[in-house]
Amino acid sequence: MIDITKSAQEYFSRLIAQQEMDDIGLHLTVNKPGTALASCDLQFHVPGQSGEKEREFKYDEFSLYVPEGIEPWLENAKIDFETTDAGSQLTIKAPGIKGKKPDDSADLAERVAWVLEGEINPGLASHGGMVSLETITPDNEVVLRFGGGCHGCGMVNQTLQGGIEKTLKEYFPEITAVIDATDHASGENPYYT
């Protein structure tokens, strides 16, 4: 069962009561499970509305529905609601949704790709951009390709040298260089022009 703290259960009970619908509960799923971009999605839910098989978890005042097959990704998940002087915050912690980080014995390309997806791309996504690993040369040069808002961006060299290269070399000192293989002249929608 997913751990929903007493304060979170009280919070959800109040919200559900405001919906003025019978038999409404909550639906928790995981988007892109097993990847560095995994995230939880929590919504109001009427049983069966998703059209997929789901598992019901009963709490004192409501039920939580989880799509079948998602439960392993939510192992040790905890939902909490905290109120402080600064305000209130709902948190969902699901330590297993991103899968397992490659260990140090994994191939360098696999470890670099994990850092790109988990640390670099979320920042680039705020500008509509992304970067992917093309290859790693025998001399440990990392070759990247930019896309989205980074394709044709006038700030890409600063992003590459000041952000990406610095981060990758901190993680992997064996990297000798980070190279951009993108044809930026063909970019159609850069964030900066």
Image: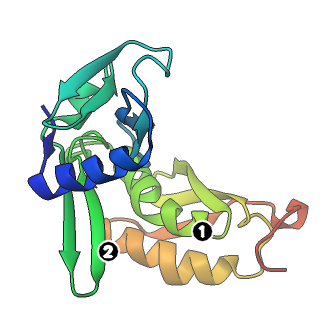
Q: Bin the neighbour count of mark 2 within 10 Å (Cα to Cα): few under 14, some 14-19, many 20 and up.
A: few
Please state which amino acid type lies under the numbered disc 2: Glu
- At x 49%, y 22%, the residue is 50
Residue 79 visible in image: no
Q: Bin the neighbour count of mark 1 within 10 Å (Cα to Cα): few under 14, some 14-19, many 20 and up.
A: few
Is 151 on the left-hand or right-hand side of 64? right
- At x 25%, y 56%, the residue is 11
- 71 or 134, which lies in front? 71
- At x 49%, y 72%, the residue is 164
Residue 52 spot, x, y in % from top left = 45, 14
Eyeballing the image, is 15 above or below 63? below
Disc nearer the start of the sequence (2/1): 1
Are dots 2 and 1 in contact, CB under 8 Å? no
Q: Which mark is residue 170?
A: 2
Eyeballing the image, is 163 above or below 123? below
Quarter of the rendering containing residue 130: bottom right
Name the residue carrying label 1.
Answer: 126
Circle count: 2
